[in-house]
Image (spheres, rainbow, N blue to C red):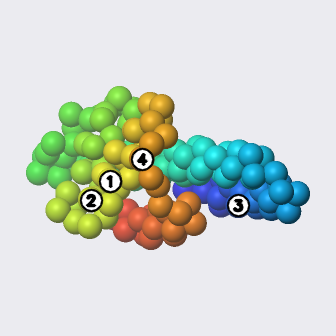
């Protein structure tokens, strides 16, 4: 996840600045402004949720491409079986769920967690700001654990 740390640090810095503004409004007794800053923080969480998920998606793409290239280059058909249909195709041309299933166990916990995150990512990316999301810091921790879980051999 190439830009993960930079995205997360930007989130934390922005969130702190916004929380400070909310505190200033509260100390001034301006409840409307404090509430507005709270709402902005919620929207910020949604935006960074999508940005951080994009880092995970880029990782899945990278692992998929590596596995595909390794398998397609194998001289023996049993090693190429099923993979050669993806030869020459960009990861973005293949549905995310398929790429994910090819780099992690569909029956495993990592796959289920990523699928849940993906469903929420789709909801948010298509304008939905109603579904509650977990703490961005907890989400980031789990994404880092998933980075390790996706470190599979081709």
- Whole-Å distance between the Cαs marked 3 and 2? 27 Å
The residue that mark 2 highlights is: 112
* Residue 3 appears anywhere in the view: no
Q: Earlier in the sequence, mark 4 or mark 1?
A: 1
Which residue appears at 32% of the width and 60% of the height? 113
What is the C-alpha distance between the residues marked 3 and 4? 21 Å
Cα gap from disc 4 to disc 1, whole angstroms? 12 Å
Of the numbered discs 4 and 2, the one sitting upstream in the chain is 2
| Label 3 or label 4, whichever comes before in sequence order | 3
**Do the residues under discs 3 and 2 have CB atoms within 8 angstroms?**
no
Residue 108 in the figure: left or right of residue 81? right
State yes or no: discs 3 and 1 in contact (Cβ < 8 Å): no
Q: How many marks?
A: 4
Residue situated in front as seen by the camera: 104 or 140: 140
| Residue 42 is at least partly visible in this image | yes
- Decide which of tag 3 and tag 2 comes sooner along the chain: 3
Mark 3 closeness class: few <14, some 14–19, many ≥20 residues within 10 Å: some
Which secondary structure, mark 3? helix
Q: Secondary structure at mark 1?
A: helix
Q: Residue, x 65% and y 58% (percent of image)?
A: 8
Q: Which residue sits at x=80%, y=59%?
A: 26
Q: Nearer the viewer, mark 3 or mark 2?
A: 3
Are dots 1 and 2 in contact, CB under 8 Å?
A: yes
- How far apart, in angstroms, are the residues tagged by discs 1 and 2? 6 Å
Residue on which disc 1 sits? 116
Q: Residue at x 15, y 42 (%)?
A: 82
**How far across and how far down the image is residue 115, in percent?**
30, 52
- The mark lying in front, picked from 4 and 2, is 4
Q: Nearer the viewer, residue 139 or 62?
A: 139
Quarter that holds the C terminus: bottom left
Report the disc number at residue 12. 3
């Amino acid at each position: 996840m190439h830009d993960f740390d930079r995205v997360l640090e930007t989130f934390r810095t922005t969130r702190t600045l916004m929380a400070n503004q909310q505190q200033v409004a509260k100390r001034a007794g301006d409840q409307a402004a404090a509430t507005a800053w709270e709402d902005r923080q919620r929207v910020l969480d949604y935006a960074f949720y999508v940005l951080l998920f994009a880092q995970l998606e880029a990782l899945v793409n990278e692992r998929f491409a590596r596995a595909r290239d390794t398998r397609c280059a194998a001289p023996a058909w049993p090693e190429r079986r099923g993979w050669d249909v993806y030869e020459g195709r960009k990861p973005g041309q293949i549905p995310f769920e398929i790429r994910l299933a090819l780099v992690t166990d569909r029956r495993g916990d990592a796959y289920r967690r990523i699928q849940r995150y993906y469903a929420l990512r789709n909801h948010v990316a298509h304008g939905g700001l109603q579904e509650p999301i977990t703490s961005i810091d907890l989400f980031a921790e789990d994404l880092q654990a998933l980075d390790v879980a996706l470190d599979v051999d081709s």
